[in-house]
Amino acid sequence: MLQAFFQRHVLCGVTRHRLSLAVLSGLIALGTAAAEAQTFIPLQTSSLKAQGIANPTPAWTEFCNRVPSECTVDMKEPRTATLTPQLWTALTSINRRVNQTIKAKTDDAHWGRADRWDFAEDGYGDCEDYQLVKRRELVQQGLPRRAMRMAVVIDETGAGHAVMLIRTDRGDFVLDNKKDAVLPWSQTGYTYIKVESADATAWASLGGIITSPTTTANR
C-alpha cells in the first residue's frame, strides 16, 4: 500500500499538488533567512543509529556500477569529521550554492525513467543528484567521503526524499536541496528510513518504517 502511494503521488519530496505562490514565497524567505544566520558552529546534537541492514535502491546500485569510486568505503578514512569553523562555512556555503545552481527536474522528464542517480552535469537534477554534487565538492575540499552518507527519508509531506548526512564530532547534520540551512538531523521533521553504510558498500536501516518507497525522489 505504501509503495503504491509513493508511486502515484510523490516525486522527490514534492506532491502533485503545488503550493500557492504566496506560501512558497514565504517558505523561500524563511529558508534564506535561516541559511544567512548560520554563521557560528551549532551546538552538540545527536547521531543517528543504524538498526540492521537495508536494501539499497536499484538506482543507487546502477549508479555505483557506473561510478564505483562514489560508493567504495575507504576504511582508512574517519567515520566522522571534526566540525571546525572552516568546515561549517564550507557545508553551509556549498549547500546553498548548489541548491541555487541546479534546476529541479524529475527523472521521468530528465531521463525518461522513474529513478536515476547522477551528477546533474547539464544543470538539471532531482534531490539525490543535488547531494551527490555537494559530496563531490566537499571531497575536493578534503572532507572524508566516509563521513558523508546518502540517506532516504520521508519528508514533512509524506513523500520519499533523499538527503546527505554529514557525520561530525558534534553529531549528524543534513544537507538538503529543499532547505538552504544545514540542520541537525532531528530538526528537519523527516522520518529517517535508511542510510549508506560507513563500513561496506551497502545500506543500513534507520528504523523509520518497515516498507520504504521504491524510488526516493525526483524533484
Image (cartoon, rainbow, N blue to C red):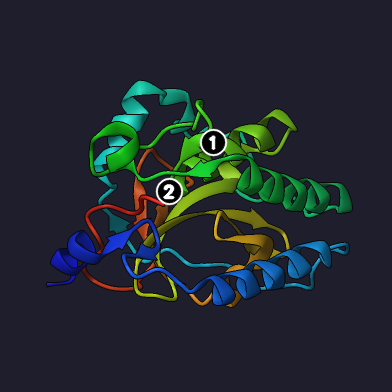
| Residue in the foreground of this view, choosing between 2 and 30 | 30
Quarter residue 158 falls in: bottom left
Q: Position of residue 217 (x, y in %)?
A: 36, 53
Q: Which residue is mark 1?
A: 75
Q: Say what secondary structure mark 2 lies in.
A: loop
Q: Is residue 112 left or right of residue 49?
A: left
Q: Amino acid at mark 2?
A: Ser
Q: Position of residue 26 (x, y in %)?
A: 64, 75
Q: Is residue 63 left or right of residue 186?
A: left
Q: Say what secondary structure mark 1 lies in.
A: loop
Instruction: Work out which residue is located at the far front of the displayed protein and give it.
Output: 21
| Residue in the foreground of this view, choosing between 215 and 84 | 215
Quarter residue 34 falls in: bottom right
Q: CA distance from mark 1 to mark 2?
A: 11 Å
Q: Amino acid at mark 1?
A: Met
What is the tally of numbered marks visible in this picture?
Answer: 2
Residue 218 against residue 14 in the figure, above or below: above
| Residue in the foreground of this view, choosing between 124 and 60 | 124
Mark before the other along the chain sequence, 1 or 2: 1
Q: Is residue 172 left or right of residue 53?
A: right
Q: Which residue is mark 2?
A: 197
Q: Residue 50: which numbered mark, if any?
A: none
Find out whether the residues at labels 1 and 2 contact each other: C-beta distance under 8 Å. Answer: no
